[in-house]
Structures are given as structure tokens and as C-alpha cells.
Amino acid sequence: MELRVDGRPLAVTMRTPGDDVELAHGFLLTEGVITGAGELAAARYCDSVDDTGANTYNVLDVTLAPGVAPPAAGVERNFYTTSSCGVCGKASLDAVRLRTRFSPAGDSVRVDAETLYGLPETLRSNQRLFDSTGGLHAAGLFTADGSPLVVREDVGRHNAVDKVLGWALLHGRAPATGHVLMVSGRASFELVQKAAMAGVPVLAAVSAPSSLAVELAVDSGITLVGFLRGTAMNVYSGAERIVDAQTPQRIRRPVSAHE
């Protein structure tokens, strides 16, 4: 899908069709272009047609509200955004280190470990497209007590997260204070960056984080959980937000170069 802002091409991403307006809102939120749904005046599909003359719905043009500044030059992608790694399309690594207006560092939320242990299964049970294809990532936004608010699937991890955070923006839940973002794969640097831009205090993943992801989580005040499987997990930052009075030994706190 090609995303345009006020008629100007901004990014192209390989995505699973569906929830494109949420995807656009989430992308613009996590890139620092907008902070509220009211900063977009409209979103419409352009007349992109295939060989049969049918609209492909692969070009979405959003109109900024009056007074909203256009995207900075650093937001534009030099290459196509791939489904596996959004960072690859950035002009430089420094451009990824965006400063959030919704810092999660001061979020006082506490999450019970038992709640976290149940999130992967809840996420998996809401992956309807995965049941058909076996090849999609998922992301979900949960309350601190484990109640699922929204789950979105996409071939790209970062797209699934953008759809979830776009939903949050459209439903008045951005910043996502007191919430948990759960992802089906690993916790990449860009996913931590997106969580920080949306004010998400807790990011949990079923697989490993990268070292850059850990570094950014520490810098941003995000609780980063990896290898969340069964009744065990690794906590790489912000362990004070996780409560496990019964069996605290199940929470592993790996020592990294950043500690």
C-alpha cells in the first residue's frame, strides 16, 4: 500500500489488506506526524486500478487538518518498507530515534505476572487469519488486567502494531497509559520505538528482543518482556511494573551490556 499525505507520497509498505485507515493513523502517530485523530481531516482511497479497471485499494491519501505541520523530511522512506523490517527503509538510524510526546517513563501501572502469562494464548485465540494461512504476525492491546481491547494481524510485525495503535488513536486511547502491547514475534527496535511514541508502558513478546530494542526500552522507560511462554518470561527493563508475589523465580532478569 502507498500512503500519501495531502497528495504527496510518503511511504510504501507490504501489508495484509484490511484496517488500512488504522494502519495510516498508527504509522503517522508512531512517526511523530500526528498526536490525535483530530489532526487528520480525511482519508480516502485513490483511483489506483488494475488491468481490469477495478480499484486496487492500494493507495490511501490522508488529508491533514488545518494547522498541522506536514511530515518532516526524515519521515520519508528512501526505499520500500518491507514486511519484515521497517527500519531498513529509514534514511538513517538516527531518524528512528524519535522523541515521543507521550513518554511512558512515568506510568505507574502494575501488571500481575499471571496476567502476562495468559496474553499469548489470548492473542493467539484472536488470530483468525493465522488459522487460515499460518503466516501472519499479530499485535494486541490489553488492559492491565489482561482484557483484550483490539487484536490486529498483518504479514508485517510493524504493520500489525501500527493497526493496533491506530485503533487506539481513533478510540481515544492514545497515549496508551496503563496498557500492555503484546506481539506474536520478536521485539524489534522499531516496535519499541512505536510503543514509546504511543505512550505504551509495557511491551511483551513471545520471542527475543534485539540489543537495540533493549537499549531503547531502557532509555524510554518501557517495561520490555521477551520469551513470554508458558509460565516464564525474561524481563529486560522496567521489572518494577511486574508483580509476582507467589513465584517470583519464574521472572528472569537477564544481565545485559546496558545494565
Image (cartoon, grey):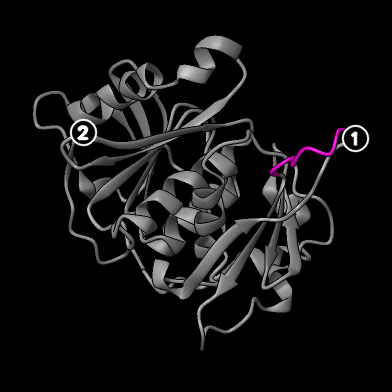
From this view, report whether residue 22 is shown above or below residue 29: above
Q: Is residue 184 magenta?
A: no
Residue 128 in view, yes or no: yes
Query: Where in the figure is residue 170, as x and y percent of width and height?
Result: 37, 57
Which residue lies under the disc numbered 1?
51
- Please, what secondary structure does the residue beneath circle 1 have? loop
Residue ID at (71%, 63%): 93
Query: Where in the figure is residue 232, as x and y percent of width and height?
Result: 31, 22
What's the residue type where badge 2 is placed?
Gly
Query: Where in the figure is residue 163, as x and y percent of width and height?
Result: 49, 45
Front-most of residues 88 and 259: 88
Front-most of residues 14 and 177: 14
Query: Where in the figure is residue 231, as x and y percent of width and height?
Result: 28, 18
Which residue lies under the disc numbered 2?
146
Front-most of residues 249 and 149: 149
**Could you give the CA–CA distance between mark 1 and mark 2, rounded to whole angstroms?**
47 Å
* Left or right of 124 on screen, residue 88: right
Give the magenta-colored segment's residue range.
52-57
Q: Residue furthest bottom?
A: 67
- Please, what secondary structure does the residue beneath circle 2 have? loop
Residue ID at (45%, 18%): 128
What's the residue type where badge 1 is placed?
Asp
